[in-house]
Image: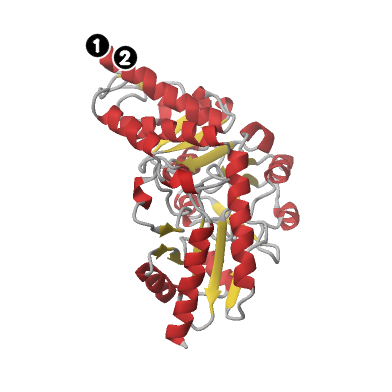
Amino acid sequence: MNAVPLRAEFPGLAGGWHYLDTAATAQKPRAVLDATLKAMGADYATVHRGVYARSAEMTLAFEAARGKVAALIGGRNDELVFTRGATEAINLVAYSYPNKGRVLLSVLEHHSNIVPWQLAGWQVDVCPLTADGRIDLDAAEAMLTPEHTMVAFAHVSNVLGSVLDAPRAAELAHRVGAKLLLDGCQAVPRLPVDVAALGCDFYAFSSHKLYGPTGIGALWGWGELLEAMPPWQGGGAMIDRVTFERTTYAAPPQRFEAGTPAIVEAIGFGAAADWVAAHGLAAIHAHEAALVAQLRSELRRRNDITLFGPEESAGIVSFAMEGVHPHDLGTILDEAGVAIRAGHHCAQPLMDHLGVPATARASFGLYSDESDIAALLAGIERTRRIFG
């Protein structure tokens, strides 16, 4: 796929900026910006409350956005909860799932898939990784017991780009009576996702990594599981009837959407889902996989670079440069108009496992192309000259 014409759709890439931090947050196409602006302006009204025409129209648009986001992962409207992001989605399950017990995580999880379980009082077990940085499902099989009521794994690692064999993870979880939650933040923008085919029970992801607005994400869950879960937060919109003696709650997904929702952001989320679907996730994955292969090949030629993760990573390349802290590399690259991520990537246990304080991470989007790789390589060479 030729990304050059696509760059014109992204105002944030004007001026020849080489943006290689899509795994942190994606730039926004004009279609998303236009939909968001229209929702904030000419179409704006509250939802689910007004009896006037514009409110009714905005309610329809809001729920249509829910449908678009749900359809992108093969789910139904009534199975998709709008949240403030994937972090809140995971917190919702950690606090509201009624059968708390032991949860099996992995070494490569983002902090947002570690800390909520700790705070909510789950007993945490940790699955190791394979030598090339994948979640070791053979080890998971040996570790899982009937005491485990949840398995929560990243579908795609935000550091290594490694892709989980989700159907096998689901089979292993279900064999002991546990549910499987997948953190899909890095997968939904890069891979075709069908929650039924994956076999998971919950799926959490964010809008801003999917070329949509910040401040909104989604939790998908099977209807019967959501129905069995009590609300996590209280307020308007999530109720059936309120008295001072007793309150009854709305059916999911509204049960988990207390307060005035992120109306404009939801419209943008839906527009982003449309935009990604129009370009095709299989094509997006193929485009990013080709760039990953090219960059890894180029970096492998250098004797001062250590690569992390599997060869077939999804849109993400993490590496370390001998004698150069990733923050220094990131600063020098920025002077040349190249943006990468440098740090622990909210995955400190994984950094400990890798034996490094931080890594440099280049991550691709649909707008990325070979010129970004060339600029990165030139910046790495300049950094080596500076450090000697």
Q: Position of residue 355 (x, y in %)?
A: 57, 75
Where residue 295 sits, quadrant-wise, is bottom right
- Tell me how far mark 2 sits from mark 1, CA to CA: 6 Å
The structure residue drawn at horizontal position 45% and vertical position 57%, both measured from the top left corner, is: 21
The structure residue drawn at horizontal position 50% and vertical position 55%, both measured from the top left corner, is: 114
Above or below for 132 versus 332: above
Q: Position of residue 50 (x, y in %)?
A: 26, 15
Q: Nearer the viewer, residue 219 or 192?
A: 192
Q: Is residue 130 visible?
A: yes
Question: Which residue has dot 2 on it?
Answer: 56
Q: Nearer the viewer, residue 198 or 286?
A: 286
State the quadrant of the N terminus: top right
Secondary structure, mark 1, is loop
Q: Position of residue 59 (x, y in %)?
A: 35, 19
Left or right of 260: which side holds 252?
A: right
Question: Which residue has dot 1 on it?
Answer: 52
Q: Which three-letter amino acid code belongs to the residue tagged 1? A: Tyr
